[in-house]
Amino acid sequence: MKLPRVIFVVAAIIVGVWLLGLILKLAAWIISGLLYVAAIIVIVGIILYWWENRQKPHATKHRKVIDAEIVDKKDK
């Protein structure tokens, strides 16, 4: 191989590795950003789930244990 061809191949490899590094940095930046978005969505979902369950009256919340046993025995 002639010297100019070797220099060109080495330069092409260096530029290729540099571009690959840029692409990987961009991918890491995108994944990192999406991780924050996903965390925010999960937190909002948990808060909405808590808020909806907090506002619903629970049927067994105000029943006493004895009343529940009597009702259960009548059903059998």
Image: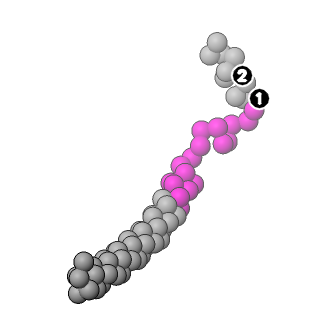
Residue drawn at 53 percent across, 58 percent down: 46
Residue drawn at 73 percent across, 35 percent down: 64
Q: In the image, is residue 54 above or below residue 43?
A: above
Q: Does the magenta stretch include residue 47?
A: yes
Which residue lies most toward the right here? Answer: 66
- Give the side of residue 29 with respect to residue 10, left or right: right
Question: Which of the two residues, 17 or 10, is positioned nearer the viewer here?
Answer: 10
Q: Is mark 1 on a helix, strand or loop?
A: helix
Question: Which of the two residues, 18 or 28, is positioned nearer the viewer here?
Answer: 18
Quadrant of residue 62 in the image? top right
Q: Is residue 59 magenta?
A: yes
Q: What element carries label 2?
A: helix
Q: Mark 2 points at which residue?
A: 70
- Give the side of residue 74 with respect to residue 36, left or right: right
- Give the side of residue 30 with respect to residue 53, left or right: left
Camera sees residue 5? yes
Find the magenta span and give its range.
Answer: 46-66
2 and 1 marks in contact (CB < 8 Å): yes
Q: Quadrant of the N terminus?
A: bottom left
Quadrant of residue 28 in the image? bottom left
Q: In the image, is residue 65 above or below residue 76?
A: below
Q: Mark 1 points at which residue?
A: 66
Q: What residue type is labelled 1?
A: Ile
Q: What residue type is labelled 2?
A: Ile
